[in-house]
Structures are given as C-alpha cells and as structure tokens.
Amino acid sequence: MRAYVRAALESAGHDVVEAASGLEALRMLPRGPYAAVVTDINMPDLSGLELISFIRRSQHGATPIVLISTEGRDSDRARGLALGANAFVTKPFTPEALLQTIEPLMADPVA
C-alpha cells in the first residue's frame, strides 16, 4: 500500500517521504515540515489513530492528515476525523481519488 500511495503522489509531482511504521513516522516528524501526512489506521508499532493524536499535539499540528483504511465503518471514519484527520479514504481507492482528496488540503494552509 505504501508503494501504491507513493506512486500516486510522485506521479503527480509530489515529493514523498515514507515510513515503514507508525513509530518510524513519529521519529521522522521533527524533520518536517511536511505538506501532508497520509496514514493508515492499521500500522506496526503505533496505529494511525495514535499517530494523528501525536501530530496534532506537536509543532506540526496544522499539517493536513489523510487517513486511509479498509476500516470503512462510520465509527472508524468519525473517530479518525475527531482525532484530527482532515479526510478519510476507504481502501480500495484509485490514485485519482487519493489526489482529489489530498491536493486541496496541501494547497490550503489553513486546512
């Protein structure tokens, strides 16, 4: 899935920094700023929901976050958005759907 997301974003001209786990993403956070973060709910070490909470409490708290997951239930979507995700994309999705979701967030500094 990381390779799929990376390919979609890079094909649209975006630079991508990739983390293999939630804990690795957390360690990389101070190296930002980042135009946006894409995270899955289910990741090794630290869930995407926990990562969102950490990001929102950090100096990068205004960074747009897109949460992706096979967990498409309304409760999962609501929990992710309540924790601070700007958008939720349910797998499977097309590269175009991801770009249509993330690019407006990256363009809007107050998103």
Image: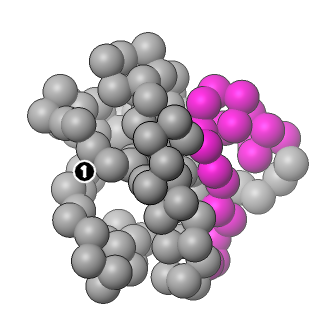
The quarter of the rendered structure image containing the N terminus is bottom left
Are there few (<14), some (14-19), or many (20+) residues within 10 Å of tag 1?
Answer: some
Q: Is residue 71 above or below residue 61?
A: below
- Residue 96 visible (yes or no): yes
Disc 1 residue type?
Ala
**Where does the image place residue 19, in percent across and percent down from the top left?**
24, 50
The quarter of the rendered structure image containing the C terminus is top right
First to last magenta residue range: 75-93
Q: Is residue 86 above or below residue 14?
A: above
**Where does the image place residue 109, in percent across and percent down from the top left?**
44, 41
Q: Residue at x 60, y 30 (%)?
A: 84
Q: Is residue 31 above or below residue 2?
A: above
- Describe the element under mark 1 as helix, strand or loop: loop
Left or right of 57? Residue 79 is: right
Q: Residue at x 83, y 53 (%)?
A: 73
Left or right of 27? Residue 100 is: right
**Where does the image place residue 15, in percent across and percent down from the top left?**
20, 65
The residue tagged 1 is: 19
- Residue 7 visible (yes or no): no
Number of labelled discs? Answer: 1
